[in-house]
Each structure stands twice: as structure tokens, then as C-alpha cells.
């Protein structure tokens, strides 16, 4: 479960830090096997590299049932309620 967030430009450094901590709080969900949070890497620019996003989140589950339980978990819902106004765009890629 890979999620890319484009954050509104008017968010402060503190708000961005709070957002990152919000992403990291998702590790409290028992179905999460691994969770990684990052920002665009400073690799050599190439046409195929997307750097417009502010944060990337990758969450690993044991199975689709774990993913589905994560989606309705109170910690996930709390994150969405608190931070949905922070992003202008979100893009999700799910893979098995």
C-alpha cells in the first residue's frame, strides 16, 4: 500500500512535522507489518521520476484482509479526520 501526498504549499514546517508524525502513528495499527515514511530523494533528475509530492508512505500487510481492516481502523480514521485538509492530492498504489 503506497500512498503519495501533495501537501498544500501554505502549510508550516510545524504542520509538516505533525503530518509526518501522523503518518508514523499508523504503526499502532496491529495489521501493519512494516511502515516507511519518506520524502522525494535527491537522486539525479530523470524524466520518469516524480518529485512533486511531499511525503510518501508505504505500508506492508500480510494480506488483503489486513489492508481492509487497516482502512476502517480507528487510528487510520483519526489520521484521515485530522490531516485530510493538509493535502491537495493523494495518489495510492496497491500491489500484491
Image (cartoon, rainbow, N blue to C red):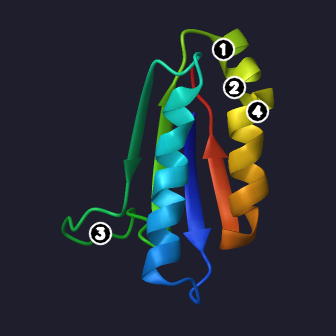
Q: Give the image location of residue 71, x and y in percent.
A: 75, 31
Residue at 54%, 28% (x, y): give it: 28
> Mark 1 falls on what kind of element?
helix
Q: Quadrant of residue 86?
A: bottom right
Which mark sits nearer the N-terminus, 3 or 4?
A: 3
- The quarter of the picture where the N terminus appears is top right
- Find out whether the residues at labels 3 and 1 contact each other: C-beta distance under 8 Å: no
Query: Gap between marks 1 and 4, in whole Å?
Result: 14 Å
Q: Give the image location of residue 22, x and y in percent.
A: 55, 51
Of all residues, the one furthest to the bottom in this rendering is 10
Q: Give the image location of residue 67, x and y in percent.
A: 67, 21
Which mark sits nearer the N-terminus, 1 or 4?
A: 1
> Mark 3 falls on what kind of element?
loop
Residue at 69%, 25% (x, y): give it: 70
Query: Gap between marks 3 and 1, in whole Å?
Result: 35 Å
Which mark sits nearer the N-terminus, 3 or 1?
A: 3
- The quarter of the picture where the C terminus appears is top right
Residue at 41%, 70% (x, y): give it: 51
Q: Nearer the viewer, residue 61 or 23?
A: 23
User: Badge 3 is on which residue?
Assistant: 46
Which mark sits nearer the N-terminus, 2 or 3?
A: 3
- Find out whether the residues at labels 2 and 4 contact each other: C-beta distance under 8 Å: no
Q: Nearer the viewer, mark 2 or mark 3?
A: 2
- Find out whether the residues at labels 2 and 1 contact each other: C-beta distance under 8 Å: yes
Numbered mark located on residue 74 in the image: 4
Q: Nearer the viewer, residue 96 or 88?
A: 88
Amino acid at each position: 500500500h503506497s500512498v503519495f501526498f501533495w501537501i498544500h504549499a501554505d502549510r508550516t514546517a510545524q504542520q509538516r512535522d505533525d503530518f509526518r508524525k501522523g503518518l508514523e502513528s499508523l504503526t499502532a495499527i496491529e495489521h501493519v507489518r512494516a511502515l516507511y515514511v519518506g520524502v522525494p530523494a535527491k537522486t539525479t533528475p530523470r524524466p520518469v521520476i516524480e518529485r512533486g509530492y511531499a511525503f510518501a508512505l508505504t505500508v506492508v500487510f500480510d494480506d488483503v484482509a489486513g489492508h481492509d481492516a487497516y482502512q476502517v481502523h480507528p487510528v487510520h480514521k483519526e489520521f484521515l479526520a485530522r490531516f485530510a485538509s493538509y493535502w491537495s492530492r493523494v495518489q495510492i498504489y496497491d500491489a500484491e
